[in-house]
Image (cartoon, rainbow, N blue to C red):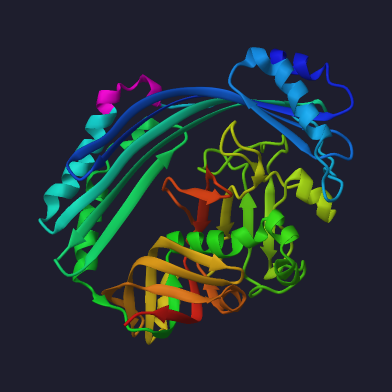
Amino acid sequence: MKDRIREALSKVKGAFVEVRFEQKESSRVAFRGKVLESITATIDGGGFVRALVPNKGWGIVTFNNIEELDKRIEQAISCSRIVIPDEPIKLSDVEPAIADIPAVLKHDFRGVPLSEKKKLIEGYNDILLGYDKRIINTASFYVDGFTKYWYANTNGACICKERADVVVAATAIASDGKTVQQAHDSWSSRTDYNEMLGHEKEVEDIARLSIGILEADNVKGGKYTVVLDPRLAGVFIHEAFGHLSEADFVYENPKAQEMMVLGRRFGPDFLNVAEDGSIPDLRGSIYYDDEGTKCRKNYLIKNGLLVGRLHSRETAGKMSEFTTGNARAQDYAHPPIVRMTNTFIENGKTAVDDMFSDIKLGIYAVDAYGGQTMLENFSFSAGYAYIIRNGRKAEMVRDVVLQGNLFQTLANIEAVGDDFQWSKGGGSCGKGGQSVPVGMGSPHIRIKDVLIGGK
């Protein structure tokens, strides 16, 4: 495959051309309540050609048969010649990469019968259904995928990668006839099917938590000092700040350009936020992006100051900044756009117990059900929460919604814990009609004057 792509590219004259080709096999088993909602095994493959003629726009062609590659390259170049961009497209310079990255698997899920995968997730689903009659529904699924990937361009880059992913997720939905609440968790691995086994206790904890949330009181709205657990803190920094750091958004949005000025203070000296797609085996690690750029650690906030943003070759060229390795495509049918990989708040120095000790009345917010952002304003729903009373975690509360201005909230961070964790879940992020796997990490963080919506 590698030689076939390089041979086709060697014939190109007068244009920049890049080719991606992928072959993927995957399986999925999903239960909704007692019903087996789907059970599938899929094999898919195809390619993507992108061409850029000088002073013209991008020409893009997708295909499924590698024998058509020469013809598809010609079509992409022809498309580029007729596209007149609003301004010339300038790509930042990148050293052509040569790399071969195999997937190293401890226990390969491809050798596990689909019937065993069904038995695994059905067992977890049965635990949820059998825990309490107030659990009225469930959503449980198993999904895996193994992808072989080739990338090459006319500058001489040639990258071969393999990627394995396996995810198990479970949700319990409980109701008392008046209200409905839910709890969830998920587990993922890049290397080992066996890491999906043996989660019976954690699945029972999901069921127990759904009932606990159902029985909890609504939180009383107001301003609180809030401690975020690592999972919610990771989601917060990804959603509220990470997307603002994606350079295509900044370049296309005058308001964002005013806000995201490098050197601006965004938080206390002990706040450091980074992004890194090169860390082995994490959910969001890609090692090389879909333009052939090597991933690396990129600081976004360093000692409280905005010091960087995330780029493709095109956005880096437009903004005269360095490429960061963040051009990602969902698959061969999509063009690369600026996306996060693994986004995280670095470890701090505060012991977690010390975060709670002097809070007379506060909120300990745990887990996340997502939320929404609009420029610097955000709204996030915690999965559940506890009242902090006189320095101790007290009763559970529910329907906790955190709201505020991102920049003021970052400035109000009072402490960053020393207990950094990567999320173990199978998270993905959507943008521009594409979804890609991402990683998030953080220690506990403490923030003052957070507006909490409630009764």
Is the stretch drawn in magenta largely helix, strand or loop?
helix
Which residue shows up at 19% across the image and 39% down it? 35
> If the image is split into quadrants, where does the N terminus sit?
top right
**Res 68 → quadrant:** top right
Give the percent coordinates (x, y) of residue 131: 13, 52
19 to the left or right of 133: right
Give the percent coordinates (x, y) of residue 154: 81, 26
Instruction: Please indicate, yes or no, whether residue 1 appears anywhere in the rendered image.
Output: no
Which residue shows up at 77% across the image and 50% down it? 315
Instruction: Please indicate, yes or no, whether residue 387 appears anywhere in the rendered image.
Output: yes
> If the image is split into quadrants, where does the C terminus sit?
bottom left
Q: In the current view of this chain or complex, which residue is farthest to the front?
A: 82
Residue 445 sits above or below residue 100 on the image: below
Q: Count numbered badges in the picture.
A: 0
Give the percent coordinates (x, y) of residue 161: 61, 27
Q: Front-most of 161 and 79?
A: 79
Any magenta on residue 113?
yes
Give the percent coordinates (x, y) of residue 190: 47, 35
Any magenta on residue 335?
no
168 to the left or right of 70: left
Q: Front-most of 46 and 103?
A: 46
Residue 283 sits above or below residue 159 on the image: below
Which residue shows up at 25% across the image and 34% down it? 120
Instruction: Give, as a single range, the part of the protein colored magenta.
Output: 107-116
355 to the left or right of 209: right
Q: In the current view of this chain or complex, which residue is farthest to the left?
A: 133
